[in-house]
Amino acid sequence: MFIDSHAHLFDDRIDIAKCNLDLVDAVIVPAYKYENFEKALRFCETSKKYFCALGIHPEFASEFNKEIKNYIISKKDKIVAIGEIGLDCSYTSDTNTQIETFRQQLELAEILNLPIIIHLRKEQDFKNFFEIIKDYKVRGVLHCFNGNLQDCKKSVDLGFYISFAGNLTYKGNVELRKIAKFVPLDSILIETDSPSMLPANFRRKGINTSQNISFVAEKLAEIKQISIQEIAEITKQNAKTLFKLN
């Protein structure tokens, strides 16, 4: 049984009735903008397998306000994390706005004693992240990891988990597989990032769902030279620890 640590299963492109989730024990379902908060929460009420997270993605950083902050606080008993939050200088919203929104959500995670689900993409995003995060006492995961080996080492040293998605299976992602080989087993999570990030064998067709988590686990097991069952058990326990899942 696997835990998918990041999947937007409330997305309209996903027909959840057609998904075979028999091998999935739990899914963390992060919302990423205010308009899909309620949708994500309602979706997670449909099964005990689903656990909701709420946060404002850097693409939508400019919409964060006191109303959204208070809304998240009001739902603290229904969520397991603040996320998806982070930094991404590839988007048009200015960096200062992203940083301010990120800081406010880090403060919120501290107040609510919740882990964070972090989105970082570019080299500068990682530099800004390491400069900012030292001001906060938070735990969390760098989802769909996209940094270099040095970024990975610094993140692990700070106590963060590193999560790998379908891009780990892409033929050209040699460096990412080297990074996965380095990461200690007790710092690894796996995810699908559904509906994006299809594994290599599905990359040109279809919509990604949590049923494809086994392909990420299979590649990680190959890299780590252990069984897929061990990867399943280790990453499941890591997810339970981070998100305090029963």
Image (cartoon, rainbow, N blue to C red):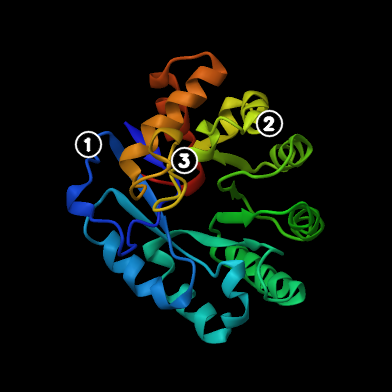
Pointer 2 or 3: first along the chain: 2
Marks 2 & 3, CB-CB < 8 Å contact:
no
Q: Residue at x 62, y 50 (%)?
A: 139
Q: Secondary structure at mark 2?
A: helix
Residue 232 figure quarter: top left
Marks 2 and 3, how far apart at CA: 24 Å
Q: Which residue is mark 2?
A: 175
| Earlier sequence position, callout 1 versus callout 2 | 1
Number of residues whose C-alpha sits closer than 10 Å to that of mark 2, classed few (under 14), some (14–19) or many (20 or more): some
Q: Residue at x 46, y 42 (%)?
A: 191
Amino acid carrying mark 3 in the image: Ala
Horizontal side, residue 178 vs residue 185: left or right: right
Q: Nearer the viewer, residue 113 or 175?
A: 175
Question: Which residue lies under the disc numbered 1?
Answer: 22
Percent across and percent down for residue 104 are 66, 73
- Give the quadrant of the C terminus: top left
Placement of 226 over or under 18, stated as above or below: above
Closer to the camera: disc 2 or disc 3?
A: 2
What is the quadrant of residue 41 in the picture?
A: bottom left
Q: Residue furthest left?
A: 17
Q: Nearer the viewer, mark 3 or mark 1?
A: 1
Quick one: quadrant of the N terminus?
Answer: top left
Disc 3 to disc 1, how far (Cα)?
A: 18 Å
Callout in the foreground (1, 2) = 2
- Name the residue: 55% across, 41% down: 163
Q: For the residue marked with disc 2, what is the amino acid?
A: Glu
The Cα atoms of the two marked residues, 1 and 2, are separated by 32 Å
- Is 97 on the left-hand or right-hand side of 162? right
Q: Which mark is residue 167?
A: none
Which residue was labeled with disc 3? 239
Q: Amino acid at mark 1?
A: Asp
